[in-house]
Amino acid sequence: MTAVRSLGEPILSMDSISLSFGGVKALTDISLHVRKHEILAIIGPNGAGKSSLLNVINGVYHPSSGSVTYKGATRSQMRPHEAASQGIARTFQNIALFKGMTVLDNIMTGRTLKMHAGFFWQCIYVGKARDEEIRHRRKVEEIIDFLQIESIRKTPVGRLPYGLQKRVELGRALAAEPELLLLDEPMAGMNIEEKEDMSRFILDINDEFGTTIVLIEHDMGVVMDLSDRVVVLDYGRKIGDGTPDEIRGNQEVIDAYLGVAH
């Protein structure tokens, strides 16, 4: 398990969140909090509502009821661009990269919200626009070094194996310098070595950058090794919330995974 770290006050709190699509309830009365510098894992069987919960956090879905408090501001809904501008970044279950663009250019797109030069200066690429791009490119190169992908920085993403594409997507999220990083199945489709690499990067992001992380993951070994706390969903309801050791011994969680409760 991860070493005990000093955690701060809650950076994110969700209060009685419910989400419905027509007559289908995706989430029912979910309440939880995430503390600064915490690694929180959200687990549960397929269809439990895990990705829906992340989509509420970063504004892709608007809850039917309940509220979200982020950095002290309470809201009933937020648009994705507002979430991004306020320090929330996201990776997706299915890789969402520009396959014809290079690794460097894909990660560079993560800097878009931090670019302020006007359209005119960007078109002629002199003065402010050039100076700004140099600064942002320097930051992207630091991320490339951090993720140890220097040798493929000029390679089109579509030519890379799946595991490296997942690492590039992580790099693009880091380029936004998030305070809260949402990772939707970052280990999906990876072999053991790739999972070990990704686990190390997640811990380093949390430790070196101080980034708060919420992740969805099906590999229980990864979850128990990385997480400070684990939230368990089943059929859109929260059935567990505690340390990895507490979740291991939670009979309701055990029953849900074994199908006993249904």
Image: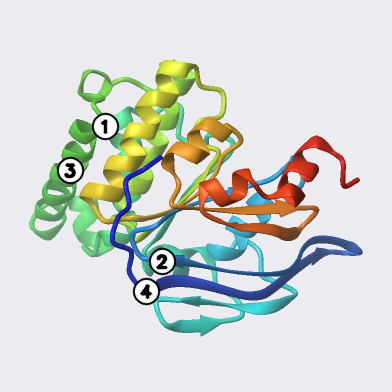
The residue singled out by tag 3 in the image is: 137
Tag 2: residue type? Arg
Q: Which marked residue is nearer to the observer: mark 1 or mark 4?
A: 4
In which image quadrant can residue 116 be found?
A: bottom left
Mark 4 packing: few (<14 Cα in 10 Å), some, or many (20+)?
few
Q: Which marked residue is nearer to the observer: mark 3 or mark 4?
A: 4
Of the image marks 2 and 4, the number of the one nearer the N terminus: 4
Mark 1 packing: few (<14 Cα in 10 Å), some, or many (20+)?
some
Q: What is the spatial separation of the Cα atoms under label 1 and label 4, in whole angstroms? A: 29 Å
Q: What is the spatial separation of the Cα atoms under label 3 and label 1, in whole angstroms? A: 15 Å
Q: Is residue 100 left or right of residue 241?
A: left
Mark 3 packing: few (<14 Cα in 10 Å), some, or many (20+)?
some
Circle 1 sits in a helix, a strand or a loop, which is it?
Answer: loop
Circle 4 sits in a helix, a strand or a loop, which is it?
Answer: loop
Q: How is the image coloured?
A: rainbow
Tag 4: residue type? Glu
Tag 1: residue type? Leu
Of the image marks 3 and 4, the number of the one nearer the N terminus: 4
Q: Of 142 and 68, which appears nearest the observer?
A: 68
Q: Which mark is residue 147?
A: 1
Q: Position of residue 236 (x, y in %)?
A: 76, 57
Tag 3: residue type? Arg
* Residue name at image x 55 percent, y 64 percent: 57
Q: What is the spatial separation of the Cα atoms under label 3 and label 2, in whole angstroms? A: 31 Å
**On screen, 27 above or below 13?**
above
Considering the image in quadrants, where does the C terminus appear? top right
Q: Which marked residue is nearer to the observer: mark 3 or mark 1?
A: 1
Of the image marks 1 and 2, the number of the one nearer the N terminus: 2
Q: Which mark is residue 35?
A: 2
